[in-house]
Amino acid sequence: MSLQPGARAPEFALADQFGRMTRLSGLVAAGPVVLVFFPLAFSSTCQGEFGELRDHAAEFARAGVRVVGISVDSKHTLRAWSEREGYDVTLLADFWPHGETARAYDAFLPERGFAARATFVIDGGGVIRSSFATGAGEPRTLDQYRVALASLGR
């Protein structure tokens, strides 16, 4: 991951799971955002990670941040996954051009065709305050998110 704290977060415009276009600038205008890049919906590790985010949503709300997931899945796949699992977060489809946003964040794995497990905490000014990633098949932990949220100084 080459995007480090202090760097300006790359702008993007992606469809959410309902087909609404979502821009990073629009997200951060409402406050800090946690971008959670993940490989694929319906995969066991991703499902476990987002289940934990869902089950601890109050922690993110108290920190005043919005959690946004991004994968190369289609908006239709993300909507079906979200509805089936009860995820109350925005999920963005980096479907086409394939992985373009993940590439901009240096979070795309070209040999696999999907995003790495990379997380970026972005403040209301569009600046990356914290970032972290885990290896293939290795879920991110709540403690990693807690440390990253502390970078916002809230």
Image (spheres, helix red, strand yellow):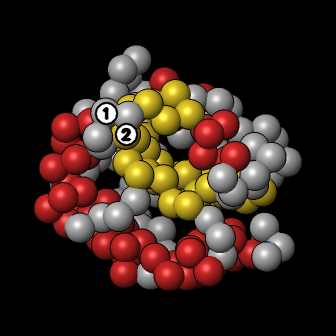
Q: Position of residue 54 (x, y in %)?
A: 37, 73
Residue 113 visible in this rendered orientation of the protein: no
Q: Amino acid at mark 1?
A: Gly
- Image height of 130 relative to 26, above or below: below
In the foreground, 43 or 30: 30
- 133 to the left or right of 16: right
Q: Position of residue 125 (x, y in %)?
A: 80, 46
* Circle 2 residues within 10 Å: few <14, some 14–19, many ≥20: many
Relative vertical location of residue 52 with respect to residue 35 in this rendering, above or below: below
Q: Indicate whether 132 appears above or below 154.
A: above
Q: Tell me which residue sits at (44%, 81%) in the image.
A: 56
Could you say which quadrant of the image residue 89 lies in? bottom left
Q: Amino acid at mark 2?
A: Asp
In the foreground, 47 or 108: 47
Q: CA distance from mark 1 to mark 2?
A: 5 Å
Residue under circle 2?
A: 16
Q: Residues within 10 Å of mark 1 (few under 14, many from 20)?
A: some
- Residue 154, by quadrant, is bottom right
Query: Which residue bears the numbered disc 1?
Result: 19
Q: Which disc, if any, is residue 128?
A: none
Res 9 seen here: yes
